[in-house]
Amino acid sequence: MTENKKEQYKIILEYIKDLSIETPSASTLLFVRENINSYQMDIDISSLVLKNKTLEITTKLILQDKKNSTEKAFFEIQYATVISIDTSITDKKVISRIVLSDLQKFIYPKIEKIFLDLIRNAGYPNIKFEKNVDFEKMYNDKFN
């Protein structure tokens, strides 16, 4: 039996919980503009149980240089989504799939656009993310 994923949860609220863009100097800006393609994106997803089957999910994107460059910039966004889960859902695997895959596939394009727009406006106009994030694969790798 396949369930309608849109009926399994409802988004109550979304907001930027924290945002950090750090470029220490003009020379760093110029150096990072030339080397931004070597920056790597990390994604971290955490959840906090509220009440009445309500969860606050924080999706954190961190873009950083993991090499030992002397000139570095740092970019991070924490995006919170408060959802309610259908009360008939009790299986923790189903809830985990909602949090780590289904919800992320829905909200990630919005988070990525916000993050890219902010980074571009911070002095990095040519930045783009080359790889698509496969949340289904991430979920399966973690739980299978």
Image (cartoon, helix red, strand yellow):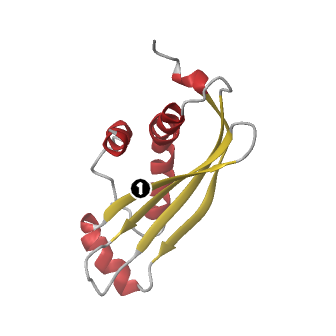
Horizontally, residue 104 falls left or right of residue 70, namely: right
Name the residue that disc number 1 marks.
43
Residue 91: x and y in percent read 54, 30
Give the quarter of the figure containing the C terminus. top left
- Considering every residue shown, the one lying at the far top of the view is 1
The image quadrant where one finds the N terminus is top left
Element carrying mark 1: strand
Would you place residue 42 above or below residue 130 in this image? Answer: below
Q: Residue at x 52, y 61 (%)?
A: 77
Q: Counting other residues with Cα less than 10 Å from the Cα at mark 1, is it few (<14), some (14-19), or many (20 or more)?
A: few
Q: Position of residue 29 (x, y in %)?
A: 37, 78
Say which of 88 and 84 sits in front. Answer: 88
The vertical placement of 37 against 136, above or below, is below
Identify which residue is drawn at 75% across, 43% down: 51
Amino acid at pointer 1:
Ile
Q: Nearer the viewer, residue 83 or 18?
A: 83
* Left or right, residue 16 beside residue 97: right
Q: Residue 81, image x and y in percent?
A: 62, 46
Using the image as rendered, state which of residue 22 and residue 34 is in the foreground. 22
Residue found at the far right of this picture: 52
For the image, the number of numbered tags is: 1
Q: Position of residue 119 (x, y in %)?
A: 45, 63
96 sits to left or right of 132: right
